[in-house]
Image (cartoon, rainbow, N blue to C red):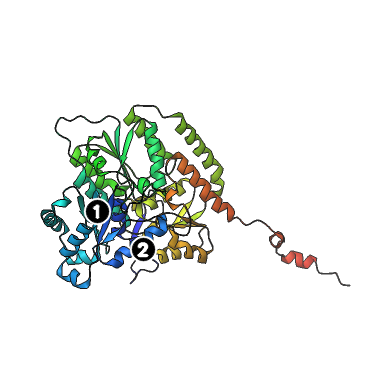
Amino acid sequence: MAKIKTSTKSCTVNSLKMSQPLGGALAFMGVRNCMPLLHGSQGCTSFGLVLFVRHFRESIPLQTTAMSEVATVLGGYDNVEQAIVNIVGRTKPDIIGICSTGVTEIKGDDVDSFIKTIRGKHPELADVALVNVATPDFKDAFEDGWSKATTRLVEALVLRPASGTSRRQGRLNVLPGSHLTPGDLDELRDIIEAFGLQPTFLPDISGSLDGHVPDDFTPTTHGGVSVSQIAAMGSAIHTIAIGEQMRPAAEAMEARTGIPFTLFRRLTGLAPNDEFIACLAKISGKPVPAKYRRQRSQLIDAMLDGHFYFGGKQVAIGAEPDMLLNIGGWLADMGCRITAAVTTTTSPVLDQIPCDEVLIGDLEDLEAGAEGCDLLVSHSHGRQAAARLAVPFHRIGLPIFDRLGAAHQLSVGYRGTRDLIFTVGNLFIADLHEPDVGTWRQPATPTDSVSATPATH
């Protein structure tokens, strides 16, 4: 069991953490025809907008209530009202997702009360869902914001099934964590549908941030799960949650609709995917398709091929808790040693990380602990540390802005795990140092020096 420690430095150096409001905003981007709205200063939104654009390389819908110093002190009702009315008038969204920020949380704006008053004054908002979530950026981290926004979506939009209503056979709810990419969600959808099940993902960024070119421009999200689909999630037969961060949303779904849930803390690796496939076979009552039996066999072969390069390697990882468990657990399965693990926030999964100690800290802490390691794993802000340490660097999480295809990274399922073995294994292989003329010559020994001395008479 890993020991959990928190950095006691006076300040953060080279931050690993992404803020709660950004996690909440990204979750809202997984809802169709949505406009995420950050209740805070313009700078907060500008920072998030730039980060998302650099990572996804897409146009990002994100608005702000543009709180000034005076508005922050006096209260933000007028700013929230004006922002909502302007957004509805100009972009015609189905839903506006409102995330608070540090300044408005410290002031204590009661946004839920604001929304009730605004609805009373503006009947034109009757058909627009307004969902507010508290995401102060002075505490918690990215995955917490995602978790809270998803939980609020469940509480606000999922309809309670009427008494005596039967479940819709084959319907399955999926609550994916923020550590999964659009490519991961596409893979999970294919796997679930292969069992004859019809999944509804909440949030579903695979529809809105998967890098496709839409037929027409829209200022809101142009894909994802619709408000009507979210409302119908209460008629499903089961809920699958992926990542410990999604437990609150799954529990909210169960409390609201009575739908049981199964939570998978990780879906990278052989054993976790065996459990996932077995769960789908049980829910559907159907045998495992031959395609996935074949993929499992391919994964085992890849593990056999790769273990020569993974075994005994020392790895340093900096990531959000669920990502840290997912990647760290898989690397340990492959024979690596996690010598440094740094994360962003507290979580029930931290003591399960396969290492001696997990530090809640920053990338400076990760670099200090990574001395002598064989691989550094983090998002793109860790690249300078990897360069200084002269070790291979594998990018995971958000943001990844110095490589193409971040949205299509795949790490779940048998196929995703297999491809991850090849990607990371090739980094190890590329770092092998081939012998050359300079390394062929063995250092001289004292015996060699004596024998080389010419005899004298």
Report the side of 451 relative to 410 (left or right).
right
Q: Say what secondary structure mark 2 lies in.
A: loop
Under mark 2, the amino acid is Gly
Q: Are marks 1 and 2 in contact (CB under 8 Å)?
A: no
The residue lying at 14 percent from left, 32 percent from top is 163
Q: How many marks?
A: 2
The residue lying at 24 percent from left, 66 percent from top is 66
Between residues 293 and 70, which one lies in front from this camera angle? 70
Q: Which residue sits furthest right? A: 457
Label 1 to label 2: alpha-carbon separation: 30 Å
Q: Say what secondary structure mark 1 lies in.
A: strand
Report the side of 273 relative to 40 (left or right).
right
The residue that disc 1 covers is 97
| Residue 64 spot, x, y in % from top left | 26, 62
The residue that disc 2 covers is 361
Select label 1 or label 2 by which is in front.
1
Q: Does residue 272 show up?
A: no
Report the side of 191 relative to 298 (left or right).
left
Under mark 1, the amino acid is Gly
Q: Residues within 10 Å of mark 1 (few under 14, many from 20)?
A: many
| Residue 227 spot, x, y in % from top left | 25, 44
The residue lying at 58 percent from left, 52 percent from top is 429
| Residue 36 spot, x, y in % from top left | 27, 55
Between residues 261 and 303, which one lies in front from this camera angle? 261
Q: Does residue 391 show up?
A: yes
